[in-house]
Image (cartoon, rainbow, N blue to C red):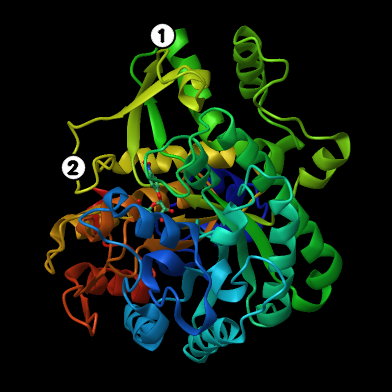
Amino acid sequence: MVAPVTLCLELLGIACLLATATSREVNQFPEGFLLGAATASYQIEGGWNEDGKGESIWDHMLHEHPEYGNNGDNGDVACDSYHKYAEDVQALKDLGAKVYRFSISWPRILPNGDLDVINQPGIDYYNNLINLLLENDIQPLVTMFHWDLPQALQYIGGWPNPILADYFLEYARVLFDNFGDRVKLWTTFNEPISFTRGYAGSGGQAPSQNASGIGDYLASHTVIRAHAMVYRLYNEQYRSTQNGRVGITLSTNWYEPLDDREETLAAQERMFQFEFGLYANPILVDGDYPAVVRERVDNNSRAEGRPRSRLPSFTEEEKRMINGSADFLGFNSYTTMTVFSREHGISPSMDRDSGAFRMPNYTYPTSSAIWLTVVPWGFRRVLDWASTRYPNYPIIVTENGYADYGDLDDQERISYYGQYLAEMLKAINEDGVNVIGYTAWSLLDNLEWNSGFSVKFGIYHVDFNSTERTRTPKASASFLAGIYRNMSVPEEYFQ
Ligand code: PNW
């Protein structure tokens, strides 16, 4: 199938390049498309205090408060990937992955978060992993930060403290110096909207600080500055020799308005802006927060009798630094929720500031994660939305996947991937969205944060009852391997 717009161009004899790019069937991936799988350090590594690793905020919190985890589950051992990374690479090889997205544990490299101790065994671990990946023709896509902040930096306040941006910059320099010769795809942060929630309540999301509506904005503010500082550092000192690309991973669901009333559509827009635009607008659009976020937080702060807005401001110099500080957009998306206008949430809170309420639509097939229902068409819509709102940035889908209870014959997961990948291919081949890669979440069943090992996202089963942490491919692993090998999704998923 050829997109009509391309046909017109072809008839006019314009743009051969465009024509070749889109003359493939709708179910085929573009040449060079990066297909692979994703994980994150705290969720898989274990070895929480081995070989000089420092304590992370998740280690600390789940040791102090096992009740915040599920059944006392924590990441002390997890999938034991600290020892079993070679099996992970073999699993990726069997999958036919061209890319592996993993994260580096900051406290494994810098146990105190600072340069006072640089932990060589930690560097060796990631060097071994990276080298083995490259020997197997698998490209590393490295997340510098996926929530496991060194506890030492939480003792000085964590992300709400602006000095964390300097610490992050110094950590990033260590990563570029040690791994940048071989790592060509970097994302600074995974889902700031998720981990800054650790400052928005006492609900057990590390570091579980109760500063709703204040700490979360302060944390986001530092994170955006830190991201941009690292991007500029790469440009100035590494790009010319290392030639890689640096981006950030942001997440959003598709938000389907409950009805088509104006106030509902405005709530849909606010939902997107508070969750995604909060980061995407400064970094990808104009160096500053979305106007609707600025206005609502400022107004609420004033109404609360505060002398300053709970949402900090960037200086003009910071805006220039932040604006355009990404080579690509890492994009995590799993589901669709229904959204409508409603005052809700405690005061102060981001929920209350947003005035938008979202909920899963349970008329769609459910999963073992309460927030995740299977709505394939929403994936195409959200990709279309992101590429329209934030044009000029290639997208790598850094997470997408399905949660179940662990069956090896995971037909629901197969159905999820088949349908979601089909919708992504429609976005690419019919709507012209510039997606250049996709890493399935997740390579392995792993520690799903507060839900522990009960919520399973893996295409490989991990036996958490065995000290071997045996990996076994699920049916979905061979399904995806077929897609990765053929670079196409079976046609039945397009009907
Ligand atoms: C992501 N939601 O978090 C994280 O990056 C992963 O570490 C995590 O394991 C994975 O998704 C699965 O949960 C999300 O409510 C958490 O829409 C919640 C949502 C989305 C992503």
How far apart marks 1 and 2 lie (CA) works out to: 28 Å
Which residue, given by chain and number where applicable, does mark 2 sit on?
A: 366
Q: Quadrant of residue 95?
A: bottom left
Circle 1: residue type: Arg
Ligand 1 contact, mark 1 (Cβ < 8 Å): no
Q: Secondary structure at mark 2?
A: loop
Q: Residue at x 68, y 45 (%)?
A: 161
Percent of width and height locating residue 28:
40, 62
Residue 389 seen in this snapshot: no
Residue 60 is marked as none
Q: In the structure shown, which secondary structural element does the residue marked by tag 1 occupy?
A: loop
Mark 1, residue position: 261
For the point 38% across and 74% down, which residue is it?
46
Residue at 26% x, 68% y: name it.
Answer: 459
* 225 with respect to 122 (left or right): right
Residue 286, position in %: x, y? Answer: 75, 35
Earlier in the chain: of badge 1 and badge 2, it is 1
Q: Relative to residue 179, is residue 327 depicted above or below? A: above
Q: Do the CB atoms of the residues marked 1 and 2 lie less than 8 Å apart?
A: no
What crowding class fits label 2: few (fewer than 14 Cα within 10 Å), some (14-19), or many (20 or more)?
Answer: some
